[in-house]
Amino acid sequence: MQRIAIDMDEVMADFVPKHLALFNRDFNENITIEDLKGKKLREYRPHLKMEIRNYITEPTFFRDLAVIKDSQEVIKDLSKQYEVFITTAAMEYPTSFTAKYEWLKEHFGFLDDMNFVFCGDKSIIKADYLIDDHTRHFARFSGQGILFTAPHNVNETGYVRVNNWQEVKNYFLK
Ligand SMILES: [Mg+2]
């Protein structure tokens, strides 16, 4: 079986809407996802970089993120024909481990726990494919990188890109 590694944030878990809503509420702003095309919130409001990060280091932040549309159904289908691993750079936010694990159990309980990989540097991952919203993880990846569209990466070119989970399905199962 070929092996597919799948990132969590902004691929399975809808990170930006919650982060942006909290930020807008607390800083009396009205920033939209449209405003964040091509950049991260911390690049859009660099003077509040620390405050922006503080939301994410809060231990429960990741626990109630919305599931990205069609990801459950498509990952379930993929797992019948491929070996699927969930690979999240959780070391970037060590306080997130429990919330991320519980979130996976709640929404992707059909996957085996042993296929959850909480890692630091993703170059250690050996898989045939990596679906991720950050191109930096493809640089030292030996398989095929597949860029999952997120607001911050819309202007990046030169990668195999999928815009949603139906496109992932078409790529792997057609
Ligand atoms: Mg991600």
Image (cartoon, rainbow, N blue to C red):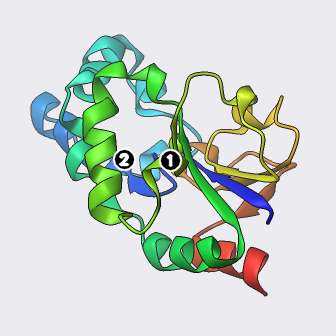
Q: Determine whether, in the image, residue 171 is placed left or right of residue 113.
A: right
Q: SS class of the residue under badge 2? A: helix
The type of residue carrying mark 1 is Met
CB of mark 2 near ligand 1 (< 8 Å): yes
The residue at which mark 2 appears reads as 15
Q: Position of residue 112 (x, y in %)?
A: 47, 58
Residue 42 falls in which quadrant of the image? top left
Q: SS class of the residue under badge 1? A: helix
Dot 1 alpha-carbon crowd within 10 angstroms: few under 14, some 14 to 19, many 20 or more: few
User: For this rendering, which residue is in front, 120 or 48?
Assistant: 120
* Whether residue 95 is visible: yes
Callout 1–callout 2 Cβ contact below 8 Å: no
The residue at which mark 1 appears reads as 114
Residue at point 55% right, 77% down?
74
Q: Is residue 18 positioned above or below 98 on the image?
A: below
For the residues labelled 1 and 2, the Cα–Cα distance comes to 24 Å
* Whether residue 20 is visible: no
Q: Determine whether, in the image, residue 134 is placed left or right of residue 158.
A: left
User: For this rendering, which residue is in front, 35 or 129?
Assistant: 129
Dot 2 alpha-carbon crowd within 10 angstroms: few under 14, some 14 to 19, many 20 or more: many
Q: Is residue 157 positioned above or below 40 on the image?
A: below
Q: Position of residue 66 (x, y in %)?
A: 29, 60
The type of residue carrying mark 2 is Phe
Residue at point 60% right, 71% down?
79
